[in-house]
Amino acid sequence: MIEKDDKFLSAYMNDRRRIVEEALLHYLKPQDNISSEIHEAVHYSVFAGGKRVRPILCLAAVDATGGNLTQAMPVACALELIHTYSLIHDDLPSMDNDDFRRGKPTNHKVFGEALAILAGDALLTEAFVLLSRAEKIRLPAEGRLQVIQEIAYGAGISGMVGGQALDILSGNLVPDENILTEIHRRKTAALIVASVKAGAILSGAPKGKIDAIADYGENIGMAFQISDDILNVTGDRELMGKETGSDAVLGKLTYPSLLGLDVAKQKLNEYVEAAIDSLAGFDERARPLRLIARYIGKRQA
Amino acid sequence: MIEKDDKFLSAYMNDRRRIVEEALLHYLKPQDNISSEIHEAVHYSVFAGGKRVRPILCLAAVDATGGNLTQAMPVACALELIHTYSLIHDDLPSMDNDDFRRGKPTNHKVFGEALAILAGDALLTEAFVLLSRAEKIRLPAEGRLQVIQEIAYGAGISGMVGGQALDILSGNLVPDENILTEIHRRKTAALIVASVKAGAILSGAPKGKIDAIADYGENIGMAFQISDDILNVTGDRELMGKETGSDAVLGKLTYPSLLGLDVAKQKLNEYVEAAIDSLAGFDERARPLRLIARYIGKRQA
């Protein structure tokens, strides 16, 4: 039974990832020959091996609410453009100063800092070009505005950028679970909430369903960040062949570093269960969303 | 008569600037206490003495097409947020590396590079929050989507960011009037086109009027950039008390540096006249737009 779930989820994720890759290639086709460098920089990071988590979650929310996948593609892709912009800017020398991401040189290592900043800016802006142009979206304009609103909000000061600002300044704050939760909620969960809400809005789901999907997003968003932080600890452990302890992750404020690995794992499980509970009113079409939550819970095993 | 025009334009600009300042203060009120640093960084640059050219042009286009100023305010302000983001990122050490702008330390000099990058990102994103939320805009959702589309397009790869990328890479290109025009068209004119088009769309103007206003925007956008470049030359001249020549502006590709000051002034006048010609089908309500074009033509005197 569990093996059957794994197979189903793996096939589902692969299929959705494939259609997202195709759509991204389509949307990122250069419109002219004159600005090839910025297109190259944008292309490099968008196709640098991303797992397409946010587009897949958006499409899974469309599936869960009985919507149309084709018309959701511009929105799913816009979410990936926003996520990619945030990675390019996070990696910059003045931010996390990372030379590699997913085994490849980061954008500024290849194209220089100036073009990397502009490539991030371009991706963020093109996301809104895509969201507002997308002729394929047959949803009434009112719903399309609502989708743009959710995504801008999730990416803005109340969401991702605000969370990133809090994160880089968190070194100056007294470590505290409330602040940590607020950072995760904004930096990671907010755009995931926007991803699944956008999917439900695109399906024309009723408000109750949209709210439930938003709860799901908030919970798996938190779970996703905690499982990443746990993997960083346990990953280091394997890599270095020794116990690095739970507070060794680059001095960053994380659940493992603040509360220890065991409490972090417990929190992770609570968020996964809460995510699945949020979907109580959904039928079998929410199976992918449920299995994705379970999968995030198991990543740290 | 000319004195009367000057007085009218001065009073008009002051009044519009005042309502834009008020609206910006209103929209940029922090929504929480937790992310005060990013709000401070955003606030610092938005209120660092900008002339509000793009919002004023948007409102003048609303006036020219008989629209409602109040409902245009969120759009006018969103344009200023996008312009401010572009200035913050342009000033960064890896870009133009400017320590001062309008006599004040640049954003990264005050808040550090990381927060300056995030403040720019936040401003760009909040512009779309404002454009998609703005409950005041009573325009049908279809028109509001069109406004978002024009602004995202003008700020994106085909517009401002693409122009900025071309500009920083232009040192590697053989100087050429076509490339120079393309850089100006994207870097400066595209967002100005979006500003005036948005105003006309908000008024519910017919397509012919929107197209004419877009022509006006393209022409004064080009004129604005050329007059800035001329002022840089003639300004330097006065500042340094000697003839710096027309190709001395930091080695950047400009009309004065490529074609000389006299040809640049001639081009400027041609764009100003073309801008005014674009408004042939408009009545007396387009007087502010016409006088702004004349004013840009005279800045270099």
Image (spheres, coloured by chain):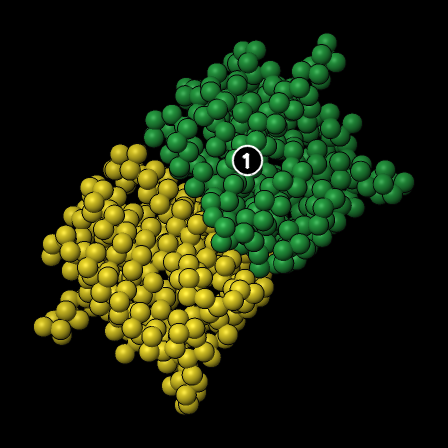
Chain colours: A green, B yellow
Q: Mark 1, chain letter?
A: A
Q: Tell me the crowding category of disc 1: few under 14, some 14 to 19, or many 20 or more residues within 10 angstroms, Cα based.
A: many
Give the answer, above or below, for where A181 lies relative to B245: above
Residue A166 location in percent, x, y? 58, 49
Residue B191 as seen in the image, left or right of residue B125: left
Does residue B23 appear in this view?
no
- The x, y position of residue B201, in whole percent, is 26, 43
Residue occupied by mark 1: A24
Circle 1 — which element? helix
In x, y percent, where is residue B237? 40, 85
Work out which quarter of the rendered image holds the N terminus of chain A and state it.
Answer: top right
Q: Residue at x 57, y 59 (%)?
A: A114
Residue A62 showing in the rendered view: yes
Which residue is pictured at 75% across the width and 13% down the height? Answer: A3
A255 and B182: which one is in front? B182
**Residue B13: x percent and y percent?**
23, 63
Q: What residue sits 54% from the left and 67% below the top?
A: B171
Query: In the picture shown, does residue B233 fall above or below A269?
Result: below
| Residue type at tag 1 | Leu
Q: Quadrant of the C terminus of chain A?
A: top right
Left or right, B291 with respect to B159, comes to: left
User: Which residue reaches farthest right?
Assistant: A241
Residue found at the far top of this picture: A1
